[in-house]
Image: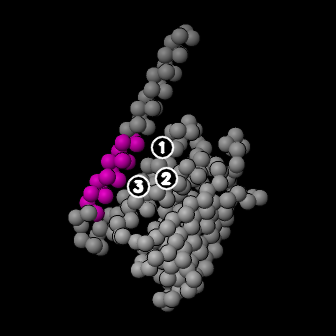
Amino acid sequence: MTRSVSRTTAFAADAVRAAHHQIGNSLQSVASLLSMESRTAPPGAASILSEAGRRVRTVMHLHQRLQEGGGDVVRLDDLLGDVCRDVAELDTVDRDAEIRIDLDSLYADARTASALAMITAEWLSNALEHGLVDRAGGVAVTLERTETGARLVVSDTGIGSTRGEWTPGFGLALVPRLAAQLGASITRSISPAGSRFELVCSGVWSDPGQS
């Protein structure tokens, strides 16, 4: 009886691993297809396809990190590092931009990690595409532990408010909704010296065993 239960458990574990592997491959295929299509599409459509591909890749990285962790806990510095590198690599414009990444070793559940990854990608992409649209500069991405959770900051030395009213697109409009899901607070400052976006949230910890 014990041997039969063990065989059933092993079979179920193998089936779950195979399913996760297939999900990962499917996400990779979708991201690759969107990237390929964006290269030949008209400028307006190319931008939309590229953004869609970036968001799929963010989900793909989350899935990979969950599998590596073997549970519902994600190491945020690894995940957000993946996301920042993706945004930089998928930025097709030849910019004179320096990206600095400083991420504390923190952990969160899948829901919190997913929201933070999406927000990081949107803010970094916005800094490159709009802040540094036609000038050299730098972008800094930081994640640090606070007494009650964590602080995420994305700042740039770009055009800031020198061109007048700042108008958010779909990606930045999505950020407040994600922040609301986390019960997080967001502050934004834009000046001729550049832009700074900050999010403070709970539900993040330093020890993976704290969850």
- Residue drawn 53% across and 86% down? 161
- Residue drawn 40% across and 42% down? 23
Q: Earlier in the sequence, mark 1 or mark 2?
A: 1
Question: Which quadrant holds residue 22?
Answer: top left
Image position, residue 66 (x, y; %): 53, 42
Using the image, determine if residue 28 lies above or below residue 54.
Answer: above
Q: Amino acid at mark 2?
A: Asp
Contact (CB < 8 A) between labels 1 and 3?
Answer: no
Q: Secondary structure at mark 2?
A: helix
**Left or right of 142: which side holds 24?**
left
Using the numbered discs, state the Cα–Cα distance from disc 1 to disc 3 in whole angstroms. Answer: 12 Å
Q: Which residue is mark 3?
A: 56
**Left or right of 184: which side holds 25?**
left
Q: Which residue is mark 1?
A: 64
- Packing grade of label 1 (10 A; few <14, some 14-19, many >=20) is some
Query: Which residues are drawn in magenta?
Result: 23-38
Q: Which residue is mark 2?
A: 82
Residue 47 within the magenta-colored segment of the rendering: no
Contact (CB < 8 A) between labels 1 and 2?
Answer: yes
Image position, residue 174 (x, y; %): 50, 68
Q: Secondary structure at mark 3?
A: helix
- Packing grade of label 3 (10 A; few <14, some 14-19, many >=20) is some
Q: Can residue 2 be seen?
A: yes
The majority secondary structure of the magenta stretch comes to helix
**Which of 40/73 is in front?**
40
Q: Amino acid at mark 1?
A: Gln
Q: Amino acid at mark 3?
A: Val
- Residue drawn 42% across and 53% down? 57
